[in-house]
Amino acid sequence: MKNNNKVKFNICNCHYALQKTQENGEIGFENPVAMPGAVSIALDPNGEPESFYADGIEYYIIANNMGYDGDLELALIPESFRTDVLKEEADSNEVLVENAHSETAAFALLFEFDGDIRKIRHVLYNCSASRPKIEGKTNEESREVQTETLTIKARPLASGYVKAKTGNKTSAETYANWYKSVYLPEPKAVDAETEGQG
């Protein structure tokens, strides 16, 4: 138990990775891009289990995992995210232009929390982001940093995968490569003896 985290704090190391369709038709991801300045994240589960009643009892519970909804607060939304995901267009003068006909892109969201032993790394696979509010206020006696917030919807992939996170036994290689490419689950190897017992 000495190597297990007891607490977590401080969101950091936020990245996004654009979704892409591979030649075999499966969903893949481009290399993660850093999003510095993460302030907070708050994502609520979407979808509650539903009960089916028969014979006068709760006969079956239907799983209903529809991912997560919530907010990601940043010091400033990076221009790369605005152009890659929100599809703002840079014109010939490098002015970012928002076009009502543009459709936003799907992406994976990667981030981590500090722990007392080591950081806990996360990825949400199928995210969309809505346009942020335009807001600000005047300086008073002291200056206050004014952040920007993205509303995030994370939905299951066709495979059913919603998210992944590192655990106490995650391999050192997987942990070290978390931000080099989007981690996709690998099925556990089936023991030949166990498989033959079916």
Image (cartoon, helix red, strand yellow):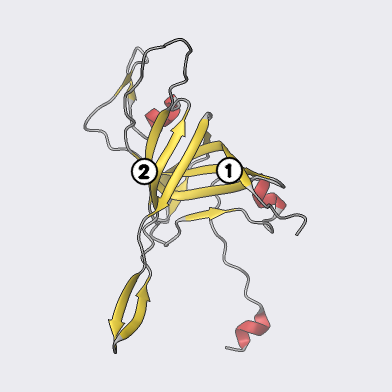
Drawn side of residue 24 relative to residue 51, left or right: right
Identify whether 182 is placed above or below 135.
below
49 and 159: which is toward the camera: 49
Q: Tell me how far mark 1 sits from mark 2, CA to CA.
A: 19 Å
| Residue at disc 2, secondary structure | strand
Quadrant (top left/top right/bottom left/bottom right) for the N terminus: bottom right
| Residue at disc 1, secondary structure | strand
Drawn side of residue 188 relative to residue 18, left or right: right
Considering only order in the chain, which callout, 2 or 1, is on the residue closer to the N terminus?
A: 1
Residue furthest right as drawn = 2
Q: Residues within 10 Å of mark 1 (few under 14, many from 20)?
A: many
Drawn side of residue 64 relative to residue 109, left or right: left
Please tell me which residue is depicted at 62% across the width and 87% down the height of the picture: 196
Report the amino acid beneath label 2: Ser
Numbered label attached to residue 128: 2
In the rendered image, residue 15, in percent from the top left (x then y), is placed at 52, 37
In the rendered image, residue 99, in percent from the top left (x then y), is placed at 25, 27
Residue furthest left as drawn = 101
Drawn side of residue 168 relative to residue 19, left or right: right
Identify whether 128 is placed above or below 99.
below
Report the amino acid beneath label 1: Glu
Numbered label attached to residue 112: 1
Identify whether 127 is placed above or below 72.
below
